[in-house]
Amino acid sequence: MMAVSVPKRLFKRAVDRNLLKRRIREAYRLRKPDFYSDLGSKSIWIQMVIQYRGRSIADYQTIEESLGRALGKVMKSVSARLSDDGAPSQSV
């Protein structure tokens, strides 16, 4: 499960916020199968909130690359916790 947040403080117009949310959701949708297949093999499910932190409207390519790096960091964190504990933990 994933939620997307784009701050109204930085993007006053709803059109701009919605554009960024659509781009983030699409980038996530395309990366989701690989991400969850790795997690599913380890019997782990994650709930996350993605908050857009940029001050300008990024193009889709930039968002996709950033999301890929972020999901990679999440996988590293999960793998590190599994190797430390030997079993999945409740909070990641």
Image: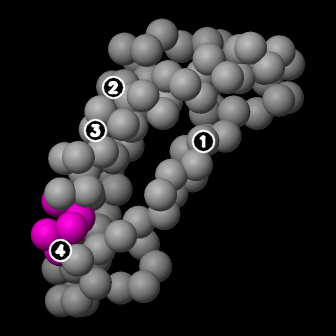
Q: Nearer the viewer, residue 12 or 86?
A: 12
CA gap, disc 1 and disc 2:
16 Å
- The answer for how far apart the CA atoms under marks 3 and 2 are is 11 Å
Q: Which mark is residue 31?
A: 3
What color scheme is it? one colour
Q: Residue at x 42, y 28 (%)?
A: 26
How far across and how far down the image is residue 16, in percent?
71, 15
Please report the bounds of the magenta region as a residue range: 38-42
Q: Quarter of the image for the C terminus: give it.
A: bottom left
On the question of residue 20 being in view, the answer is yes
Examine the rendered structure and indicate whether residue 12 appears above or below residue 68: above
Q: Secondary structure at mark 2?
A: helix
Whether residue 40 appears in magenta in the rendering, the answer is: yes
Asked which secondary structure carries label 4, the reply is loop
Q: Position of residue 41 (x, y in %)?
A: 14, 69
Of mark 3 and mark 2, the one earlier in the sequence is 3
Distance from Cα at disc 2 to Cα at disc 4: 25 Å
Question: Residue type at mark 4?
Answer: Lys
The residue nearer to you, when weighing 8 against 80, is 8
As measured in the structure, the alpha-carbon distance from the residue carrying label 4 to the one carrying label 3 is 18 Å
Of badges 1 and 2, the one in the foreground is 1
- The numbered dot on residue 42 is 4
67 lies left or right of 12:
left
Q: Is residue 76 visible?
A: no
Badge 3 amino acid: Arg
Q: Nearer the viewer, mark 2 or mark 4?
A: 4
Q: Residues within 10 Å of mark 4 (few under 14, many from 20)?
A: some
Chain-order first, disc 1 or disc 4: 1
Per the image, label 3 sits on a secondary structure element best described as helix
User: CB of mark 4 within 8 Å of CB of mark 3?
Assistant: no
- State which tag comes first along the sequence, 1 or 2: 1
